[in-house]
Image: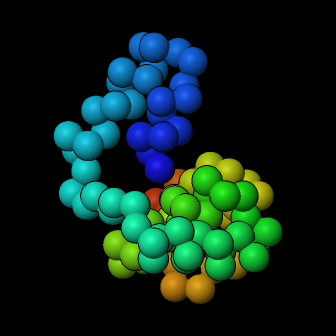
Amino acid sequence: MHELENAENPYEEKRNAIALWKDFAVEYCPSSDEILLAGQRIMAHGIKAKDALHLACAIESHCDYFITTDKGLTKKNVNNIIIVNPIDFVRKMER
C-alpha cells in the first residue's frame, strides 16, 4: 500500500525520500487475498479503501496500534487494533 500511494506522489523529491521506508521497516506485509478480504470488511466501518488496506496490513502483522494523523480515521473503531494519533500514542507510551 505504501508503494502504491508513494508512486502517486507528484513530488519527486518527497517520493524518493519516502521510497526509503523499506530500509527502516522491521515488518513487510505483502498483498494477499486475505488482506483484500480484510480490507473489504474494514470498509464496512465507513473507512476508505486505501486506509482499510493499510489497517488490514497492520492487523495481519499483529500490530497493537495504527498511528495516523487522519482525524476522521482516529474516530473509527476497528476490531483487533487501536487507531491513534502520534501525540496520543507518545503520551500513552510515556505512562
Residue 14 vs 81, above or below: the answer is above
Q: How is the image coloured?
A: rainbow
Residue 35: where, in percent of width, then height? 47, 71
Residue situated in front as seen by the camera: 28 or 37: 37
Query: Is residue 84 visible in this depiction of the protein?
Result: no
Give the quadrant of residue 82.
Answer: bottom right
> Who's the residue at 57% across and 18% down the image?
10
Give the quadrant of residue 13.
Answer: top left
> Who's the residue at 53% across and 15% down the image?
11
Residue 12: where, in percent of width, then height? 45, 14
Drawn side of residue 27 relative to residue 79, left or right: left
Residue situated in front as seen by the camera: 52 or 72: 52
Residue 33 vs 2, above or below: the answer is below
> Who's the residue at 48% across and 33% down the image?
6
Drawn side of residue 17 relative to residue 55, left or right: left
Residue situated in front as seen by the camera: 27 or 72: 27
Residue 63: where, in percent of width, then height? 39, 73
Residue 65 vs 72, above or below: the answer is below
> Who's the residue at 52% across and 59% down the image?
54
